[in-house]
Amino acid sequence: MPERQKNQDPVFLQLSELASEGSGGRICFATDDWFAPAEWMLKDSEPVFIPDKYTTYGKWMDGWETRRKRIAGHDWCIVRLAAPTSIKGILVDTAHFTGNYAPQFSIQGTRLEQGEEELIPERGPEMIGTACSEQDLKLMSALKSDQWTEIIGMTPLQPGYEETRKQYFTVDKSNEVFTHLRVNMYPDGGIARLRVFGEVQPDLNALKKSQIDLIGVLNGGQCLSYSNAHYGHPRNLIKPNRGINMGDGWETARRLDRPAILKTDENGILQVPGCEWAIFKLCSKGSVESILVDTNHFKGNFPDNVKIEAALLDDKETLQSAQWKVVLNNTKLSAHKEHVFREEMLQYKGPCTHVRITMAPDGGISRVRLLGKVL
């Protein structure tokens, strides 16, 4: 059974997260969505509690909550991960579910092949106050999801008080890749949020057929290290779609070494001693053809300029031995804007396996795309 983490945040939280709505995860099926639909368990936002908010079906809760079960069985749902993933850790959050959390849970997983997901009955846009039919259960039985690989065995959950709500589980299934998870609640109740952390395992042969985002998380890009993530983690830079707000990007604290009076050079670049950086591993060795840097939502806190460098490392080399070459030299940025840098504006274009993104002096960037070809 995966080990439950205690006391400190586990290392796997630095990996890509593949279950949340913003990452591309979604609910395919649920046995019951009475008080709160399973989709809400994948929300990007932190769970909230509104004391006086009720719906036609009962108390409004920010997560997935089923009715008190009065028939045989237990509740479960199917989560489709954003991409095929080698899972390293899972977070189950019961925030605000204090007298109605699921007493126990388990998680199973599988890799569904193309066409198998078509066996799952179509899910409607508004599921609150509903439960699956006997016909739906019969259709789902063809997937034999109750026989999928056990990732986390039946395990007690803690109530959703602040000191007990977040429960972390390290997963050791390094040789297996999963596309779908079955989340079981025994027998019923609520879970506020589910997060699944791991490494995307892309089909590189498919990626070689066209220009792709070499750094994109769904293609296998991964954030390895960074200097500062005070307001937002740099792994947000490589998520799909545009950022939904400032919290859905990489934002640092204001650097304390900023000069009292700022000066610029002849190109308008601020002359500051410090900067913030983040290093990413590309999905594979590739060559860069264009770059997009998006400061969407960052209007009074965008960086003055950005610099992007690349390095080529083999499997035995570490980041400490990287020889960084400039792809895009220090370039001014603007507020709340997509900046496109085409091939003729780039210096070193590859081959490369890693990139370092540097902002100066500090601030926030929503997304970065490195468009190119897998070599």
Image (cartoon, grey):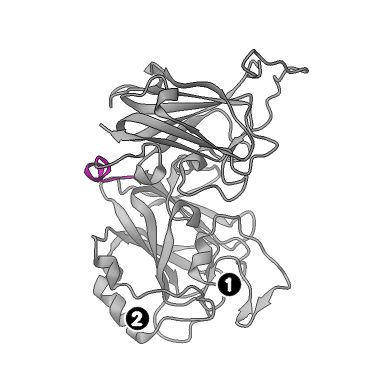
Q: Which residue is drawn at 63% across and 36% down?
A: 230
The residue carrying mark 2 is: 136
Q: What amino acid is labelled 1 in the image?
A: Asn
Q: What amino acid is labelled 2 in the image?
A: Asp
Q: How many labels does the image show?
A: 2
Front residue of 51 and 341 = 341
Q: Can you say which quadrant of the picture contains the N terminus?
A: bottom left
Q: Does the magenta stretch include residue 201?
A: yes
Q: Is residue 169 above or below residue 14?
A: below
Depth-wise, is mark 2 or mark 1 nearer the camera?
2
Q: Does the magenta stretch include residue 292?
A: no
The magenta stretch spans which residues?
200-208
Q: On residue 100, which mark appears? A: 1
The image position of residue 180, as x and y in percent, is 34, 60
- Which numbered disc flags the more N-terminal residue, 2 or 1? 1
Q: In this view, does 22 lie above or below 217?
A: below
Q: Tell me the SS state at disc 1.
A: loop
In the figure, is residue 11 to the left or right of 297? left
Q: Which residue is drawn at 41% across and 17% down?
A: 325
Q: Callout 2: 10 Å neighbours few (<14), some, many (20+)?
A: some
